[in-house]
Amino acid sequence: MVQGEGRGHMSQAMTLALLIERAGHEVSHVFLGSSHLRQTPAYFSRFFDGRLSSISSPNFIRSKDQKSVDLGRSLFYNLGIAPRFLHSLTQIHQQA
């Protein structure tokens, strides 16, 4: 499960997958928290080719000046799309 907000989480997931596989284990599937507000980078999709599913995840809404997170707007936005998160949980359960 990888939080899709920001590139750092994705880079860490790729590095961890390499370490896991070098140790003789398998990364069989990866879930990436996604949103219509951001796209999955092509390099991440290629790296986990065939093992990647996108699921809806909560999002931060930026302030009007784009310099910080607007907590109130983020809360109300995510409450409004909460049913999507339930569908994501079903997706995860079916893959497990």
Image (cartoon, helix red, strand yellow):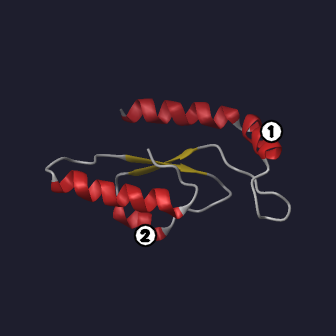
**Looking at the picture, how far across and down is residue 40, in whole percent?**
53, 62
Residue beneath disc 1: 76
Compared to residue 48, the image places residue 3 above or below, namely above
Q: How many residues crowd around disc 1 within 10 Å: few (fewer than 14), some, or many (20 or more)?
A: few
Q: How many residues crowd around disc 2 within 10 Å: few (fewer than 14), some, or many (20 or more)?
A: few
**Looking at the picture, how far across and down is residue 74, in whole percent?**
76, 45
> Seen from this angle, which residue lies furthest bottom?
43
Q: Is residue 44 visible?
A: yes
**Looking at the picture, how far across and down is residue 48, in whole percent?**
35, 59
For the point 70% across and 50% down, which residue is it? 60
> Seen from this angle, which residue lies furthest front?
68
* Distance CA(mark 1)–CA(mark 2): 32 Å
Question: Which SS class for mark 1?
Answer: helix
Question: In the figure, is residue 69 to the left or right of 89?
Answer: right
Residue beneath disc 2: 43
Assign the C terminus to one quadrant of the image. top left
Compared to residue 24, the image places residue 46 above or below, namely below
Q: Is residue 48 visible?
A: no
**Looking at the picture, how far across and down is residue 15, in whole percent?**
33, 60
Question: In the figure, is residue 90 to the left or right of 94?
Answer: right
